[in-house]
Image (tube, rainbow, N blue to C red):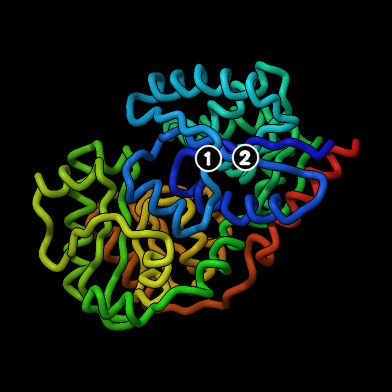
């Protein structure tokens, strides 16, 4: 019998990560797979649009959990996932990243005695105030297979006493980026927004610690205003963030737009003078596209991008943001390969099949 997998996704980074893995599973003998969508990102821009653009298969279950506090959202997912796993009887559950969907997928499976594979294992910001940090730490300690994007992540696991089932496989988001870049029309995207290559900034700000704290959000917007004095700044805003920014006032030079799909976002990132973000996944995509990055956080899981000089950290402070952008624009360091070679999906399926044989 083929190895039966169930992959649980719920948020944009997970859609991007699982697309190449779903394609690889579908193309290989000895393994089958189905997707479960928790509904953590439930509006069209954040969910269905990504499914269609990334050519993801239709989920076998859509749990429709929606928004809510961490406890309410995670608890609702646990109840629904127990039901799904008991009905589907998977041989292994695959979970991605560090969201509430990640944690719920792993916890429900582990309590039912189903093996767990964690994709993007071993990442650490060392900031336990981040909900994502707690999600990823607990998931790693529940997982049977831990797929790391790079050696730093594997070293982090070893320091926590996790050595069994660990494999450095590269990053699925690089697989997905290679696939996406084959079909994007960068010139048409820039024309649509009235932009010229290298003459605009692209920004995403969505983390709760930045958007739910009015003082921090005001400071970030003031920093974006300073940056937008050099070039116009395009800011696709999360549905939850848009009203908060509008209430505080959209700064001059900042264009607040609706969320964009993955191909459009990558086209805009590729030709930007620099990208400002508090996203985890976007930091890597910006790096692979060789665009300078400023991360509006005091720490990052993707430490290698900072070490090689393509990513700079900035606090929620106008001067810190402005200085970081100036430094990013002034220097173009060497660009070593990071996080694999774009074949993470193949590597992961190889390990899953070995797990099945053993």
Query: Toward the viewer: 9 or 301?
Result: 9
Q: Quadrant of residue 288?
A: bottom right
| Secondary element at tag 1 | loop
- Is any part of residue 147 visible from this angle? yes
Could you say which disc has been placed on residue 34 in the image?
2
Pointer 1 with pointer 2, Cβ within 8 A: yes
Q: Residue at x 25, y 45 (%)?
A: 239
Mark 1–mark 2 Cα distance, whole angstroms, equals 7 Å
Q: Which residue is mark 1?
A: 59
- In terms of depth relative to the viewer, which is nearer, 196 or 252? 196
Q: Which residue is painted at 57% across and 77% down in the image?
A: 334
Is residue 11 toward the left or the right of residue 254 in the image? Answer: right
Residue at 80%, 46% (x, y): give it: 351
Residue 189 place in picture, x, y as percent:
32, 75
Instruction: Sort mark 2 into few (<14), some (14-19) or many (20+) by Cα contacts within 10 Å.
Output: many
Front-lying residue, 15 or 211: 15
Q: Secondary structure at mark 2?
A: strand
């Amino acid at each position: 019998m083929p190895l039966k997998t169930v992959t649980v996704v719920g948020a944009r980074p997970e859609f991007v990560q699982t697309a190449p893995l779903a394609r690889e599973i579908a193309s290989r003998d000895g393994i089958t797979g189905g997707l479960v969508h928790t509904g953590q990102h439930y509006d069209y821009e954040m969910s269905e649009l990504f499914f269609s653009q990334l050519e993801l298969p239709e989920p076998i279950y859509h749990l429709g959990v929606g928004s809510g506090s961490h406890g309410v959202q995670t608890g609702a997912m646990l109840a629904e996932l127990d039901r799904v796993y008991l009905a589907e009887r998977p041989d292994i559950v695959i979970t991605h990243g560090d969201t509430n969907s990640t944690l719920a997928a792993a916890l429900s499976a582990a309590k039912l005695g189903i093996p767990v594979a964690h994709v993007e294992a071993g990442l650490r910001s060392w900031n336990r105030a981040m909900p994502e940090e707690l999600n990823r730490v607990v998931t790693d300690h529940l997982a049977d297979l831990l797929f790391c994007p790079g050696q730093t992540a594997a070293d982090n696991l070893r320091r926590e006493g996790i050595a069994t089932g660990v494999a450095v496989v590269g990053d699925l988001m690089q697989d997905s980026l290679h696939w996406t870049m084959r079909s994007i029309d960068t010139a048409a995207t820039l024309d649509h927004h009235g932009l010229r290559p290298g003459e605009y900034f692209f920004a995403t700000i969505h983390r709760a610690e930045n958007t739910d704290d009015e003082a921090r959000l005001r400071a970030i917007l003031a920093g974006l205003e300073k940056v937008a004095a050099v070039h116009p700044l395009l800011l696709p805003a999360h549905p939850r963030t848009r009203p908060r920014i509008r209430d505080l006032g959209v700064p001059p030079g900042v264009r607040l737009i609706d969320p964009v799909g993955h191909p459009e976002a990558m086209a805009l990132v590729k030709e930007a003078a620099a990208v400002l973000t508090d996203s985890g996944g976007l930091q890597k995509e910006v790096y692979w596209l060789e665009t300078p990055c400023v991360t509006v956080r005091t720490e990052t899981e993707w430490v290698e991008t900072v070490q090689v000089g393509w990513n700079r950290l900035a606090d929620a402070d106008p001067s810190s943001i402005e200085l970081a952008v100036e430094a990013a624009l002034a220097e173009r360091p060497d660009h070593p390969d990071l996080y694999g070679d774009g074949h993470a999906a193949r590597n992961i399926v190889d390990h899953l099949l070995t797990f099945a044989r053993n």
